[in-house]
Amino acid sequence: MSSAIVVDDVSKQYRLYHERNQSLKAAIMRRARVKYEEFWALRDVSLEVPEGATYALIGENGSGKSTLLKCMAHILRPENGRIETKGKISALLELGAGFHPELTGRENIFLNGSILGMTKKQLNQRFDEIVDFAGLEHFIDTPVKNYSSGMYVRLGFSVAINVDPDILLIDEVLAVGDAEFQRKCLEKFDDFRAAGKTIVIVSHALESVRNLCDTAGWLEHGVLRRLGPASDVIDEYLTESHTERAADGTHGARWGTGEVRVEKVEVLDASGEPVKRVRTGDTVVFRFHYKSNTLISKPVWGMALYTLDGVWVTGPSTREVGLFPDRLESGAEGWVDLRVDRLLLLPGTYDVSASMFNITGAQVYDMRHRAFRFDVEFGDPHEEYGFVSLGGTWEGDILDGAR
Amino acid sequence: MTRLAEYAEARELTVNLMLRELRGRYKRSALGWTWSLLNPLSTVITFSIVFAFFLKIDPPVGHPSGLHNFSMFLLCGLLPFNYLSNGMNGALDSLLSNSNLIRKVYFPREVLVVSTIGALLVTFFVELGVLCVILLLFGNMILPWIPVLLVLVAIQTVFVLGIGLMLSVFNVYFRDVKHFIGISLQALFYSAPIVYPMKFVEDAATRTSFPLLRVYTLNPLVRFIDAYRAVLYDLRFPAFSDVAYVTVWAFGLLALGLYVFHRLDRRLAEEV
């Protein structure tokens, strides 16, 4: 099979300006003195994307994956090396780029389509399909500035996906629209693959990447760290990025008076093994190790869960259920567990905070904010949207037949 | 893909961006396109009062047309100058104002400059059309001269494109090009016989040993105005030397413009 994209020894350098050299006077005064720092966003990257492959680029923020994608799209030109592409490319880097707010949806379809390389004839043929796909029949003659952001993005995506390229480059735009629109996108995506088109995706949604892509390249600080079957590369990437986190549950802010300390936070699976990844529906134990320095009376244990965005998901404590020992001797050590028989958190990354305080809550002995981080992956119930499952069951006459 | 093939593919995009420019320009303004005519009209009224009435500038009599009217005289020079000046200002902003496109989509970047100037060309045609109607009302039988006029417009467009290509990339790297051009355009306006007849310069040249006339006519804008006025005001063929001179300038500038543009557009997606 021949290659759709050949990336040969590509390096890309950015200039980080300390003082933007954009006045003539400054340019003349400083002439030879370089007033910017050189920063290599990509270093000697070589890879080949075979025709018909679905290829993923993964890595931390700033690893150079988007830069590589832009080089593939010829938007950026590398300093060294060579990029060859075969066939028509469509890059979905930003949806609705080039929309004119005062023009109607109809006018913008033609404008945006031609920006993406479609001819008027092709656009005429696909016009209905584009409008239909975006679900905007009633609004097509309204100026796009009156669109909601969802409508705007849907129209942009719909035009872009109808370009019918040989190579589709996608940067984190799969996650647009509501569930129904997502389903349509994935369908379109499958059509693309079935038609033997080449797709390159840059994404942080590792589980989607695992499902969609056959090959993945892992970039780290601009260097291609690993290249291989998507599932293997993602596993390796996940393992690594997890071990780099403070593994013993000792990071995050901490405050309190210190009479008793939360020594360690752990997440255990059903067999009592410490884990960093669990699945929705698993039995999970949150374990909080403590050590007392003085005699205290009626201590209370509390915990909280946060998403990475800082949304407070839950915050149970022993006080709420009336559980607290009368006294805790000086030097006492031990642990307290919060046992969850069926974890109803949905896939994502969460932080655990742990705290100990007195019965009134007026005195905080130790507060360990976001002390432990763990991932939740798809499990049972297999749900995707939001943070928690209600653990409910769908019912109905018509559904019973479909079961 | 070679550049030529890319250009050929980008034709439709150029037209569409041009239409975006034209459609977007007067959206939601009550007078719409009338504005593009009101602008030169107000200039003509002001200048006619100041220069023809207060300063008593006497416009030359068109030969062989016999036309003798300051406003007509002014318009024949003002419209081509406005095209140049709007073209330069438009080209300056054409890359920066489309930074979102440059950063997110690949296409030959020249398209942005070409479509901006293309949209201004359409405006220029509308203005020239109105001018021709007015000239007809004043008894200037302009119709047989329209092909010559079109040739001049074509040459000037090449000229504006050449400057525009250069200015557009310069302005990305050095933002004060825009301010510099703002001042220069003002000087440029008075450097050519737009509000005053050429005869004033010829008279002044006799009063000094400095080769004023020779230096003055080095300016391609002077030659452009001269040629336009010959066709529109006088109803005769422009001087061959004028046409040849501006043609060489136009194509020279276009070649230089393309060269500079290609030299500097490498980092465009990072710098805009």
Image (cartoon, grey):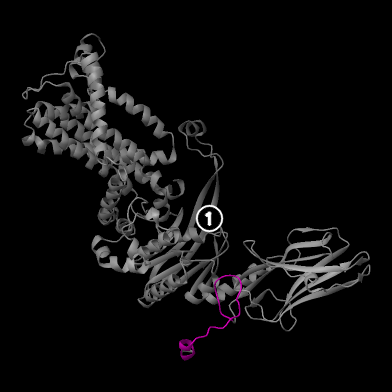
Q: In which quarter of the image is residue A84?
A: bottom left
User: SS at mark 1?
Assistant: strand
| Place of residue A132 in the rendered image (x, y in percent of width and height, measured from the top left) | 33, 69
* Chief SS of the magenta region: loop
Residue drawn at the location 17% of the way across and 26% of the way down: B226
Which of these two is toward me, A95 or B23? B23
Q: For this view, does B1 lie left or right of residue A151?
A: left
Q: Mark 1 lies on which chain?
A: A
Which of these two is toward me, A174 or A225? A174
Q: For this view, does B68 lie left or right of residue A79?
A: left
- The magenta segment is A381-401
In the displayed structure, A207 sits above or below B183; it is: below
On whether residue A394 falls in the magenta region, the answer is yes
Q: Quadrant of residue B138?
A: top left
Q: For the residue marked with disc 1, what is the amino acid? A: Ala
Residue drawn at the location 44% of the way across and 65% of the way down: A170
| Place of residue B20 in the rendered image (x, y in percent of width and height, measured from the top left) | 30, 49
Question: Does the rendering let one see residue B237?
Answer: no
Q: Which residue appears farthest toward the front when viewing the image? A: A397
Which residue is tagged 1?
A41
In the displayed structure, B250 sits above or below A333; it is: above
Question: Does the rendering let one see residue A109?
Answer: yes
Q: In which quarter of the image is residue A241?
A: bottom right
